[in-house]
Image (cartoon, coloured by chain):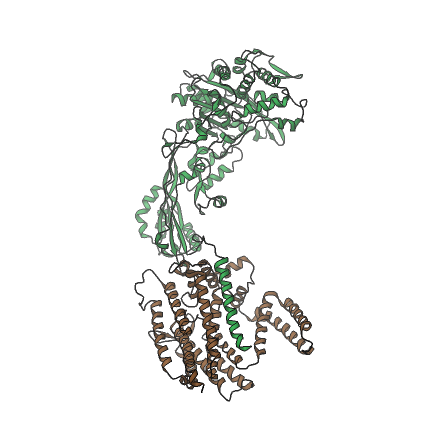
Chain colours: A brown, B green
Amino acid sequence: MAIHFFYVALVAIGWVSIYSSTFTESDVSLFDFSTLHGKQLFFIGASFVSIIIILALEANFYERFSSVFYIISLVLLLGLFVFGKTIAGATSWYDLGFFNLQPSELAKTATALALAKYLSDIQTDIKRGKDQLYAFLIVLIPAILIIPQPDPGSALVFFALVFVIFREGLPIYYLGIVLLAILVFVTTLMYGTVWVSIGLVLLLVLFLFLKKKTFKVGILPIVSVAIITVLFSLSVNFVFNNVFEQRHRDRFSLWLRLEKDPDKLEKIRKTIGYNTYQSEKAIESGGFFGKGFLEGTRTKGDFVPEQHSDYIFTTIGEEWGFLGTTTVVLLFTFLLLRLVYLAERQKTDFARMFGYGVISILLIHYFINIGMVIGILPTIGIPLPYFSYGGSSMLGFTALLFIFLRLDSNRLKEGF
Amino acid sequence: MKKILLSSIIIIIGITFIGRLSYLQIFSFSPDQVLEDPAIKAIYDYPERGYIYDRDGELLVGNQPAYDVMVIPREVKPLDTLEFCGLLGLEKDRFVEILRKARIYSPRLPSVLVHQLSKEDYARLQEKMRHYEGFYIQKRSLRYYDTNSAANVLGYIREVNERDLAKNPYYVQGELTGGTGVEKVYEDILRGRKGVQYIQKDRFNRDIGPFKDGTWDTLPEQGIEINITIDKALQEYGERLMHGKWGGVVAIEPSSGEILSMISGPTYDPSLLVGRKRSANYSKLHYDSISKPTFDRSISFEKSPGSPFKAINALIALQEGAITPSTTFTCYHGFYIGRNKKGCHCGGGTRRLNDGIYKSCNAYFVGTYKKIFEQFPSNSEAMDAWEKHVRSFGLGGYLGSDLHTGRPGSVPSTDLYNKWYGIGDKRWSATTTYSNAIGQGEVNVTPLQLANMTAAIANRGHFFTPHILKKIDGKEISIPDFVEPKQTTIDKRHFEPVVQGMADVYRKGTAQYIQIPDIEIAGKTGTVENFIKIDSVKTQLTDNSVFVAFAPVDNPKIAIAVYIQNGYYGARYAGHIASLMIEKYLKGEITRKDLEKRMLERTLESEYAKPYSGQPFKINEYDWSQHAKKPETVDTALDTVER
């Protein structure tokens, strides 16, 4: 039941924040569907209805029909190229009259189901290269369809599902290589190739000194890793300066605080850094106790763009202060830890793998969204689960969570 | 390992987030953000500044409305530009240019289109204003001067600068504050307190309603009116007399220390520093480095006092028992310092205290000065005692008045002479420092100090700290420092013979030709040598004309000091002005029209032009009939400022 509590708490706090960030003095009714918070209230109601339906269905319904859900969502994503509605430059919605459906939100759940289904298949062996490729393809196809909308943020989310593949046996050094690549990329931008190379040599020397005598490692692999790393580091500079566009460069220099010139910094602050600057300032101005419900001056003044959707967390930061933000972070942390615990106790491979899929998707949303809002990650526009305004994401995240809970409730029966 | 990996990542992310949030919300947070918050705009409601009246309740400074035409560029609809420019008295190109700049500043915020329209223009424009969308008229309050005098006393209003902002958190960029004079000293009283209204803004800077329902808003508090001790009529009359003359005049009411007038020449019309031409005028006045109209000579001009200082030496000598009124000294049309003969204009002969004063005999006072020193075992003790007496008259230090600026003057001390001549009784003596006896040495005073010294003599031994504030909001002030008398170190009984000597200055002495009928005046002339450097050559200029006086001799109502640069002998310019101002103050009208005519007509511009002419020039010309009636040689700022 802990999960249900976390869910309701997050949804409630989320709606209050949306109410506050879209509130104007002229509002009269909570249930006015012309307002965003009124609409969101409707979506929350719809989500509750969907919970009842999800829990009422047979548990094995989800496993059996996972491929169908997956194919439907791929079709819906493809259909966007023809029937899609463009909002704010992204063709990500179907116009259903009373509300806009965003299929990429639903595709997350479907892909998690499909991936779990494929990996749990008795014939799949994740140690095999071909099966690894298929598993990656399940994740990649929806992502590739989403990128040209364009919605790179949502596409990124699908890569989180790779974590499920790791959990099921993909060698850990894949992850090691990716982490090393990110590390070299970031450090090269911050300190330059020369320092990265020096650091690398020092690390290798340290490694050779400290390694156990019994641990044999040839000199060739070490040298080749070093050379590849240095080459990669050199290519980073080339890619950054020649392949990236200026706006990408600006985002990175903002994120990594590469720009030191105060005049240029001020310019970045007013252009691409505006969102980050304003959201940080809004959170900062909340202080420990916050300014109080409906008292957030920056929220009222609409200083933070997209505050009811991607930047909803700033409302909490400004109006409820450190107490509020910490509460939300703790709620997410406990929810995710609880989900890890539930996933690990599953008797069936499918349920466990789907559980990991749920965790991966929620975690990456939570990590990237709050990380972006508080200024430790670059700007990537994805919603905060259960918080951000939006019917599709509300329904999608609800379905994600409660399908897993439905599987979990079936765990004892499946065991025999 | 893979099992705990995910849990560890979740916990690490949680800790990172809380760490970053505590940095943002606890360590970077500063609570006083209301005024820095970009979402809150403070709109100030400025109260009218308090009026300034003279001692009798005559208005000196009031307020006048001024009208700025404002524009909000994005609300401007197509309009008949030619007609509108005609109404505003603006050229079309200029109009387009201002509008363009306003748009660059902000399309949504108001900018000033035309500053400070006159009442007439406003009346004409007001009717038609509604035809022009995006334009409106904003009323502002400016200072209005009901006199063209007393600029140095009243001071001016200016915009606050960085220093004001740092010193007083009350002010916000662009606000006004008193820059000098009474406006500065009594800024807090006159200013009142601005009201503030906090407005919630959105990110386009548009108002979206009151902040916290207006609970933080305050109403403005009116500025409070004050009366200053200046006598408007006397001040205005004095400034007319000072036309074309450089120097300072200060008149004090001895029984209270109230400053009746405080004149600095040359001066300017205070209205020049109000309105559209303010900054142009200010620059012209400020950068006039020759006549320095913004330099207040009445309180900041330090010069040798000359002969009026002899009265102080006489008093010290009487107090120390060095002389009695009947002690005699012989004047040989001068006196000897060692083998050098120094001149004296008194006519020579045997001098007592009385005729020593009224004939201003240098020999008498040098003798007296030496006698003072003879009363003490050592020169340094004599010097210490002498210095203490002199300082008790308020000389050589700030008086503690409520004027915004001023200079302390200087009085020499044992330390000074020890430094100059060396320590020891043989190194220096009364003979070395004899110039002090006749007010030409190391003593420097300002006209204010001179007037205060005269007031102390008029009061026979005490003075009240000179001050400018008389009433606040109609109630007499009772600042202890201003109402308690300051005693000099001289006993009251010693004053009478000196006062008699000064009265005789008018009856039969150096000022006998500037007597005023029916008024008993005690005065003392001074003719002070002065030097400047021209191309690094020390050059003597025409003597400064100095005069101190008080009247009536018994129960004095006014004590006055007049210091005129290069006016030659004391009775010439300074004496005339002092006598006329005393008559004006005591009688309200002038009987000595001959003196008045002379002073109103004659100027010293030709004297002031001499050092700048580049030609050799004569000084101390006896004939003063050619003193120009209309200046042609010196082009001062006052002739070129625009109204």
List x then y, in percent, for residue A105: 42, 76
Residue A21 at x, y percent in the picture: 39, 63
Residue A199, compared with residue A261, is above or below; it is below
Q: How many dots with numbers?
A: 0
Query: Is there any visible trace of residue A77 in the rendered image?
Result: no
| Frontmost residue, B122 versus B579 | B579
The quadrant where residue B336 appears: top right
Residue B193 quadrant: top left
Where A22 falls versus B584 (above or below)? below
Q: If the image is split into quadrants, where does the C terminus of chain B sit?
A: top left
Q: Is residue A126 visible?
A: yes
Residue B161 position within the rendered picture, expressed as x and y whole percent measured from the top left:
48, 44
**Image quadrant occupied by the N terminus of chain B:** bottom right
Left or right side of B267 for B432: right
Q: In the depicted view, which residue is nearer to us: B35 or A210?
A: A210
Q: Residue at x 38, y 66 (%)?
A: A18
Expressed as whole percent of the image width and height from the top left, the position of residue A398 reads: 40, 75
